[in-house]
Image (spheres, rainbow, N blue to C red):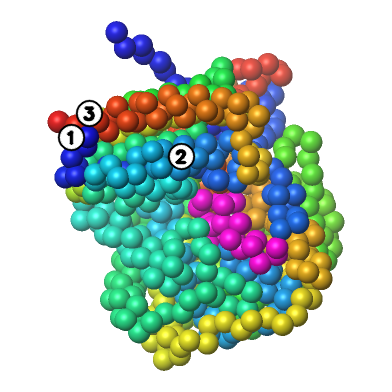
């Protein structure tokens, strides 16, 4: 007779998100802590290895945004070799990266954001998922979503040779270019992706903006933070995901600083709290002032919305139109309504698709001068790109033989750690009222707060069950009061 | 042996440089050598994608053998479990922070008409691990010690599975 064993996966010891909510005597929220795991030892792991190997290793840091790490790492390695790089390689890397962005943003919007808005934030948890979305919007749209993702992935495969664990970027360029026949294969996919991004934008307008309750939730709910904004921009202060300078503006739109990657240590520092392994980056020149909102706060967001908030314009026409419409509708720029992240992602997708078109039509893109072999080692490099979920910094040093001597990373989500912590607390305070017993619904309303950041914690591990378990513990008078669990 | 008409995928899941998280990849690589020449068998020894991407990874196969790591309450490193996708209860209703989970991806893929294997032909071999949060190329000592026995047992089951004929 078969033995029945129930497996209760916890993934790893600290492997699930924990939200600890402390209630005061009246039953209101006194404090709230959001804790997540962090992978350990990467900096130690890479020391002693040839520096040019790092872009190939870092793709294993994260299963969700491996290309972001690959690109940031490649740029840092380029720095270690004196920034000698083939101009065509910059275009090819950027082309790849825009396809990667679309691939990621589609997943977030349709699988994670849409359930809250298409099905409703308080709908039955059993149907508040991508299957519920498909049931509402139809199989045809569901199929289009999967198809668009597949096309974005196919473009990455054609351009970079692989979809996930890239071995493509080399010091001075990339290992392969695009042949004319490969460009011909990409050509129709680019047009289809552009149409899909426009469709997604329209869907958002119809479903979300067409519902006054959702607009009210976005603009007037507790999902707002008065903190500063960060994003990578080009020379015209338009968003650039692969290259440029990091611009920081306050939430009233005043520029605080604009720095080159090499200047990051002068502008960003990391605060440590005893209750979590993950650090809290802050604006160094302002000093750590705690988890506080306000015009003088040193906390910042580095998110899709932040990228648009710090920008003066978009670099492409359709994205510019979408950008203007978004801020005009929201009635504020910078916009502090965190749920508007979902809209910002769609504007970014339009930009991505337009950039794919631009490169597709570039007569130089099929050239063969895609790498220069560096002839010197300068020993230090900083690479910054915009990962989908925030500004990503890789900083390496190497010795005269090109062997890595140090590495420091500030990953996308870490930038937002303080903001996530703050908004989680803010939403918990708004949702848990004195005298009213918290319900399961609190889990989703709180999750909506940090899910807007598209956080990516320790995603390099793929242990079952393949999702980040979440645990919400509520303490009253210091004692455990209630507990909600999901997948753990 | 398995008919060549039946397409079988042997899939190693995990991160090869994250200590015990690599155990599924190592098992897939070791078993691939044993199973070389089995008709209709394809091996992807290292897969680290999840969520919606799995629809494409699994599409077109009649049967899948997945090797992965797991941590359970009270589990001992080296324990291993075998179950099918039909046992992934509850998870369908829940969402990952960034992507959908395995059960949801399967359900969505089927609803959209992708040729995915049935739940009972998706066999998961999950090994209990100790450390999957530290970067390193070796298994933890406890798991390394248990590995030869795990490999022997998993190999026995996998071979039996592949010799059981085409899915009914």
Which residue appears at 18% of the width and 34% of the height?
A: B166
- Locate residue A377 relative to residue B21 in the image: left or right: right
Q: Which callout, 2 or 1, points to the residue nearer the camera?
A: 2
In whole angstroms, how far apart are the C-alphas of marks 2 and 1?
A: 23 Å
CB contact under 8 Å: marks 3 and 1: no
Specify the quadrant that holds the C terminus of chain B: top left
Subunit that carries the residue with mark 1: B
Q: Give above or below for B51 relative to B124.
A: below
- Residue where numbered disc 2 is placed: B30
| Residue B155 appears in view | yes
In whole angstroms, how far apart are the C-alphas of marks 3 and 2?
A: 21 Å
| Secondary element at tag 2 | helix
In whole angstroms, how far apart are the C-alphas of marks 3 and 1?
A: 7 Å
Q: Give above or below for B74 relative to A295.
A: above
Q: Give above or below for A256 relative to B102.
A: below
Decide which of A299, A68 is in the foreground and name it.
A68
Subunit that carries the residue with mark 3: B
- Label 1 neighbourhood size at 10 Å, few (<14), some (14-19), many (20+)? some
Decide which of A339, A247 is in the foreground and name it.
A247
* Region of the chain picked out in magenta, as a range: A50-69
- Residue where numbered disc 3 is placed: B164
Query: Of callouts 2 and 1, which one flags the residue occurring earlier in the amino acid sequence?
Result: 2
Specify the quadrant that holds the N terminus of chain B: top left
Which of the 4 image quarters holds residue A182?
bottom left
- Locate residue A362 relative to residue B105 in the image: left or right: right
- Label 2 neighbourhood size at 10 Å, few (<14), some (14-19), many (20+)? some
**Image disc number at residue B166:** 1
Which residue appears at 26% of the width and 53% of the height?
A: A142
| Residue A231 appears in view | no
Query: Of callouts 3 and 2, which one flags the residue occurring earlier in the amino acid sequence?
Result: 2
- Label 3 neighbourhood size at 10 Å, few (<14), some (14-19), many (20+)? few
């Amino acid at each position: 007779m078969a033995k029945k064993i129930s497996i209760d996966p916890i993934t790893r010891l600290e492997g699930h998100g924990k939200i600890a909510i402390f209630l005061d005597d009246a039953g209101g929220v006194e404090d709230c802590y959001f804790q997540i795991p962090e992978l350990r030892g990467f900096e130690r792991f890479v020391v002693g290895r040839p520096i040019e190997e790092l872009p190939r290793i870092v793709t294993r840091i994260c299963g969700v945004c491996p290309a972001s790490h690959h690109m940031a790492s490649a740029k840092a390695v380029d720095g270690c070799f004196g920034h000698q790089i083939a101009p065509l390689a910059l275009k090819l890397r950027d082309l790849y990266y825009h396809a990667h962005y679309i691939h990621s943003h589609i997943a977030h919007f349709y699988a994670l954001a849409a359930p809250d808005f298409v099905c409703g934030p308080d709908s039955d948890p059993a149907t508040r998922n991508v299957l519920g979305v498909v049931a509402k919007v139809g199989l045809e749209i569901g199929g289009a979503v999967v198809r668009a993702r597949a096309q974005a992935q196919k473009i990455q495969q054609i351009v970079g040779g692989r979809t996930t664990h890239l071995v493509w970027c080399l010091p001075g360029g990339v290992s392969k270019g695009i042949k004319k026949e490969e460009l011909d294969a990409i050509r129709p996919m680019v047009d289809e992706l552009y149409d899909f991004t426009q469709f997604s934008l329209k869907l958002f307008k119809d479903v979300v903006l067409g519902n006054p309750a959702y607009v009210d939730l976005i603009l007037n709910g507790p999902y707002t933070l008065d903190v500063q904004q960060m994003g990578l921009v080009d020379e015209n202060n338009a968003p650039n995901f692969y290259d440029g300078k990091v611009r920081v503006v306050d939430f009233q739109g005043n520029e605080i600083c604009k720095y080159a990657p090499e200047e990051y240590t002068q502008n960003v520092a990391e605060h440590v709290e005893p209750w979590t392994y993950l650090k809290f980056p802050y604006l160094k020149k302002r000093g750590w002032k705690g988890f506080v909102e306000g015009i003088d706060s040193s906390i910042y967001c580095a998110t899709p919305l932040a990228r648009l908030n710090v920008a003066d314009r978009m670099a492409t026409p359709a994205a510019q139109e979408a950008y203007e419409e978004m801020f005009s509708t929201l009635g504020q720029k910078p916009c502090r309504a965190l749920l508007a992240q979902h809209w910002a992602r769609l504007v970014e997708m339009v930009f991505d698709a337009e950039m794919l078109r631009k490169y597709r039509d570039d007569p130089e893109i099929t050239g063969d001068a895609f790498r220069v072999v560096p002839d010197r080692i300068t020993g230090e490099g900083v690479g910054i790109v915009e990962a989908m979920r925030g500004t990503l910094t890789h900083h390496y040093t190497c010795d005269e033989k090109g062997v890595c001597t140090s590495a420091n990373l500030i990953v996308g989500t870490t930038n937002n750690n303080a903001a996530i912590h703050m908004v989680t607390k803010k939403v918990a305070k708004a949702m848990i009222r004195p005298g009213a017993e918290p319900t399961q619904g609190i889990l989703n309303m709180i999750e909506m707060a940090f899910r807007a950041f598209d956080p990516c914690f320790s995603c390099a591990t793929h242990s079952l069950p393949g999702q980040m378990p979440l645990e919400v513990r509520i303490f009253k008078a210091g004692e455990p009061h209630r507990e909600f669990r999901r997948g753990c | 042996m398995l008919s060549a008409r039946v397409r079988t995928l042997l899939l190693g899941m995990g991160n090869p440089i994250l200590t015990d998280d690599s155990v599924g990849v190592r098992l897939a690589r070791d078993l691939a050598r044993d199973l070389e020449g089995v008709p209709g068998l394809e091996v992807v020894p290292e897969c680290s994608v999840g969520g919606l991407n799995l629809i494409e990874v699994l599409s077109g196969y009649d049967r899948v053998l997945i090797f992965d790591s797991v941590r359970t309450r009270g589990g001992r490193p080296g324990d291993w479990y075998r179950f099918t996708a039909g046992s992934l209860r509850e998870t369908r209703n829940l969402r990952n922070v960034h992507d959908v989970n395995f059960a949801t991806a399967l359900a969505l893929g089927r609803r959209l008409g992708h040729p995915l294997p049935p739940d009972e032909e998706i066999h998961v071999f999950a090994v209990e691990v100790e450390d999957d949060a530290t970067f390193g190329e070796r298994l933890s000592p406890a798991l390394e010690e248990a590995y030869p026995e795990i490999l022997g047992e998993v190999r026995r089951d996998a071979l039996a599975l592949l010799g059981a004929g085409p899915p009914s």
